[in-house]
Amino acid sequence: MSRPTTLFGEHAAAAAGATGLPKPNRAGAGADQAPARAPRATARRRGSRTYGLARTHPLASVAYVAALALAALVLADPLEVVLLLGLILGVLTAARRLRATRPYVRLALYVAVFLAVLNPLFSQGGLDVLWQAHLPLLHIRLTLQGLVFGAVTGLRLATVMLAFALYTVVLDPDDQLALMSRFSFRSGLVVSLATRLFPVLQRDAGRIADAQRSRGVELDRGPRRARAVARVPLLAALFTQSLERAMDVGSAMTARGYGRRGRTRWQGTRRWRAGDRILLVAAGVAGLALVGGSLAGAFHYAYFPLLDDPRAALASPWWLAAFAALVAPLVLELTWLRSRA
Amino acid sequence: MAAIARLEHVTYTFPGGITPALHDVSLEIGPAEVILVLGSSGSGKSTLLKAITGLVPHHHGGTFAGRVTVDEFDTRSAGPQEISARVGLVLQDPENQAVMTTVEREIAFGLENQGVESRAITRLVEEALMSLGLSHLRRAPLETLSGGELQKVALAAVIAMQPHLLLLDEPTSQLDPVSSEELLAAIRRLSEDTGATIMLAEHRVERCLHLATRVVYMEDGAVVVDSDPQSFALWAVAGHRELLPPVARLFAQRLNGQAADHAQRGDLPMTVKDARFLLEETGRRVQAAASPPARTYGETVLQARRLAVGFAPGEPLLENIDLELRRGELVALMGENGAGKSTLVRHFNGLATPLSGEVRLLDRDVRELSVAQAARGCALLGQNPNDYFINDTVAGEIDYSLEHMGFVGKERNDLAARIVADLDLVAVLRRDPRELSGGERTRVALAAVACGDPALVILDEPTRGMDPLHKSELAALLRRWAETSRCVLLVTHDVEFAARTADRVLVLGDGGLLADGPVHEVLNGSLFFSTQINRLLRHALPGVLHEDEVDWGVSLQ
């Protein structure tokens, strides 16, 4: 039987009237939260071919990423920071994972711009005043030093974020688990399971929200409080499903012998290669140079009251040693790729 | 030959359960057998397999009586960890059995647990990858694999452990016909090449009855039939024809009761090939049954114009989709895994926003409506019924939906009463929906989305894991709804179900709509998206899709 005239009946009409609807639909509310597995799969990295840092032994890659992160934390000179940022982007490109870092790059840019814009308003030191204004409660004094400090601080934060993003998107969690399992298999397994199941949980949450929308529950419109209240029951469904999934995963693990005595550790098919040794040595050299340079004050850069000459720091032997060590594996990788092309 | 596993008077009740999930089950499982375990949802198939692995009772708890032995191990004293060296288990949902994040590590996981040394693991992982054609995916993250690939990885992970007995719990229920065929071919190869014993729990008999050397049929936790396939077929002909493959049903429905003779002679066909031989032998004396009168359809409920859908602008998954759905139609939307079927229907109630083009639901642009508003015109039932359950009772679920759809007073009560009657939910109204069987849960979830009497009802893979009896009931319900001038759109991989239920079929592929036409035109002559009966009779009776459309005009003898 049909009810065409009452289809979006009184309730919908009232809701529409109250909120000024019809409006354009919310931007795909829920639409992009739970895409089907296979179409998404086609858009993502698959296959066994790996490149750059993703191809190297996990111990070497972890050491190298740690050295990059350390560099991002200790370097303060604007030119050094820019060069390091370029190097990290180069490493991501060589591993063919630059695209995967888009969300991190976007976030890093937001943060960098936010800091670059706000910082000069609060860092009012510096002698080169560009502009100033006296407001009733606020005295704004924009200086060249404050501007540069804000911009470089934003850039440094972006560099640190990308260094850690490198760890997330390039290094294989199972390789990390294998590495970690030398010390504690259970902890490593927890990390691996969390890594694998987090996207599954996200998909579950998106699906449950869509299921509720599809039965008339308004999750995307109305007052914030009402929307929050409407979402609370979803947590119960998510929790129940997560528990059931955990039970199933537990069954599957047990049925494959998990918990049995005498567990061995598979070394994997990754062998130590010359490139891995070079990477490990390079990471070690860079780490030593960065620690040594920091202790020796070689990476200090003064923004106030006047800017130091950024070129001066580039001549520091600590910087040269650290940067050469960090850039060498990338140069070797690119040479290797060109020789294969 | 000595048995690999033996069950002696096993009775088991889950914790908090009232009736036993297994009731006095006794079985002896020999080497190189391929045992097909059949039974409706909740009949105890999965529990039986778990009892053999020792997961029941060790992992699940509950009350266990009787004895299960696997080789020299008694599962009462040996845990599933010990048994895992002898018995491998592949579960229904591949998503719920993966532990690691990449393919080769996933395969190595069980071997590490068994204490196999590293070099041997490398070799066994390699062999498992090769045997299932997964070498190119060895380092692929599991989250990037399709359901079929993930299920193959699960199988590879188990066969790498070289079990004597391989247990498969509805391994194809989540897969499309092509992926299912690939997985079953791999299982058959495994059985033929290694002589491993395989126990396969399945609902879709047409896919696997011919692989079996023995059939176990369960009801209410008890083994009702344990015999060779032909004896099972003889038993099924007498009152459980839905358990037979369509070609066997075709021969079983012949006039003069000669089907039983066929079965007794051992020639009731299980495959298209067997049936074709039999037809040749008997002179192909079949004819098409009288077609039902053509149905007429009502007004348009949904219209898509130049629709492009996808996850990123400039990268459409599907484009140039033009279609119209009308009242009274029962339409099946088909296509391989990843073709974009589920993605497409999410645009019909506004869950997703088109990249370009327009969807009009009862002449309203869907973009003007919230999903909640669209719910009164378009009910969309997703693949997992559990996603809908947030109340403690079935009645609560229905009331919750009606309240949110804005129905009040008598209208609300009338709609609730109608959906309860339509979906036969009276007996379970006060029960927790999460505690119901699979088929019942699907019906409750359907009630939750369709209680507002929508003009369009969309069901995404409703027959996944559903037994034949529940499928028949669902097909009858959907037919009834279509006849009462609703439009029903089924997203399905189940060709036999689509052929029996739908009037019209849409096939998606290659980024667009590949076919759109009457079911008898679209499913006729297809390689995989076709029924057994059509593959058997497509030359003699083009367009015939299932056995009810065939008449045995002349006796075969």
Image: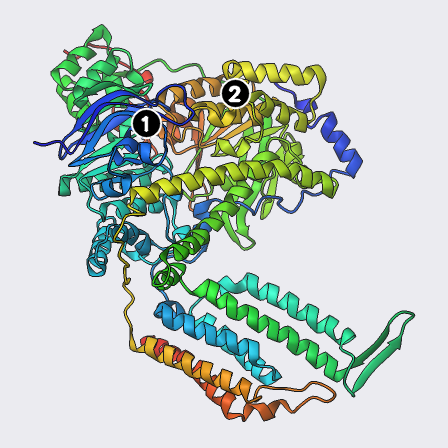
- Which mark is in front, 2 or 1? 2
Specify whether B302 is left or right of B102: right
Q: What numbered label is drawn on residue A169?
A: none
Numbered disc 1: secondary structure: loop
* Residue at x-position 63% and y-position 26%: B400
Whole-percent x, y for residue B351 in the image: 59, 40
Where is the C terminus of chain B found, in terms of image quarters?
Answer: top left
Numbered disc 2: secondary structure: loop
* Residue at x-position 54% and y-position 55%: B314
**Above or below for B301 versus B320:** above
Q: CA distance from mark 2 to mark 1?
A: 26 Å
Circle nearer the N terminus (2, 1): 1
Q: What numbered label is drawn on residue B203?
A: 1
Specify whether A123 is left or right of B79: right
**Above or below for A276 versus B92:** below
Three-letter residue code for mark 2: Arg
In terms of image quadrants, where is residue B465?
top left
Question: Would residue B88 be visible to someone looking at this image?
Answer: yes
Pointer 2: what residue? B431
Where is the N terminus of chain B found, in terms of image quarters?
Answer: top left
Three-letter residue code for mark 1: His
Circle 2 Cα neighbour tier, 10 Å, few/some/many (<14 / 14–19 / ≥20): some
Q: Chain of mark 1?
A: B
* Residue at x-position 58% and y-position 88%: A297
